[in-house]
Image (spheres, rainbow, N blue to C red):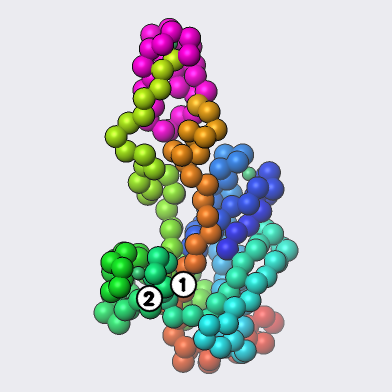
Amino acid sequence: MSITCPKCDNSIMLQGPVRKVHCNACQNDTDVPVKYWKENLYDALEWIVSDMKEGESYNLMQFGLFNTKWSVYELVPRCSKCEKKLELKNVDRNKESKVKCSKCGKETNIVPAPSWLKRRVPTADFFVNVQMHDKLEDREPAITGGIALTCPQCGGALIIDGKDRLVPCKYCDVHVYLPDDLWLRLHPVEVKSRWFLVYDKKEVEKIDFDAHWE
Ligand SMILES: [Zn+2]
Ligand SMILES: [Zn+2]
Ligand SMILES: [Zn+2]
């Protein structure tokens, strides 16, 4: 799922039902209202119960508050690395946890439906493989062990922590702008990932979707 940044038209990935997104292109934050999630999740649930079969998907481009590009699947949650179905029977749906893939060992995060969402979409149970927090905090550094780069003016060693693209040289006071290829290694372009909403099928089938929209 991705939206177009309302400030610069760059595309921003939605890796879960987040309330705020950060645009890496223009550096602005945008609030994602509860209403947006409620409407989209109800839409998805309605398609799923009305005419989707396991394994089917819809690709959509929606115009509204944001221009949203997304694919909706009816699918049992799978490991993002090897596609093995995840074992979710023992998941504690009231707290954040991780489930380990029985085939490749990759861990996938489990996040309970946040209360603001649960109030509007009571059939939402928990989420699988979502990223709810700010990416930069959560993400492991793309490069560990340090990077050797010298100041082009004085040849002094620069200290690069990956946070700031403009690095001051402590020897000659010049500021060095890190080149594109190095910056992209430190901050890889985010790619779309598939995330899952686990829902109560019996409860979803009881929803009167026509009444819901009136
Ligand atoms: Zn932007
Ligand atoms: Zn796996
Ligand atoms: Zn220098």
Q: Is residue 99 left or right of residue 64?
A: left
Give the quarter of the image for residue 110.
Answer: bottom left
Q: Nearer the viewer, residue 140 or 81?
A: 81
Going by the numbered disc 1, the residue's amino acid type is: Phe
The verdict on label 1 being within 8 Å of ligand 2 is: no
Magenta stretch: residue 160 in it?
A: yes
Whole-angstrom CA distance, mark 2 to mark 1, is 14 Å
* Nearer to us: label 2 or label 1: 2
Which residue was labeled with disc 1?
A: 196
Give the percent coordinates (x, y) of residue 86. Answer: 35, 76
User: How many numbered markers are drawn?
Assistant: 2
Magenta stretch: residue 4 in it?
A: no
The verdict on label 2 being within 8 Å of ligand 2 is: yes
Q: Nearer the viewer, residue 129 or 56?
A: 56
Give the quarter of the image for residue 151.
Answer: top left
Q: In which quadrant is the C terminus drawn?
A: bottom right
Q: Residues within 10 Å of mark 1 (few under 14, many from 20)?
A: many
The majority secondary structure of the magenta stretch comes to: loop
Q: Is residue 56 left or right of residue 131?
A: right
Q: Quadrant of ligand 1?
A: top right
Question: What segment carries the magenta color?
Answer: 152-177
Give the percent coordinates (x, y) of residue 118. Answer: 45, 73
Give the percent coordinates (x, y) of residue 4. Answer: 66, 53
Instruction: Report whether residue 102 is seen.
Output: yes
Give the quarter of the image for residue 83.
Answer: bottom left
Which residue was labeled with disc 2?
A: 84
At a point 49% along the width and 67% down the height, the residue shown is 194
Going by the numbered disc 2, the residue's amino acid type is: Lys
Query: The residue tagged with tag 2: helix, strand or loop?
Result: loop
Query: The residue tagged with tag 1: helix, strand or loop?
Result: strand
At a point 44% along the width and 80% down the height, the residue shown is 76
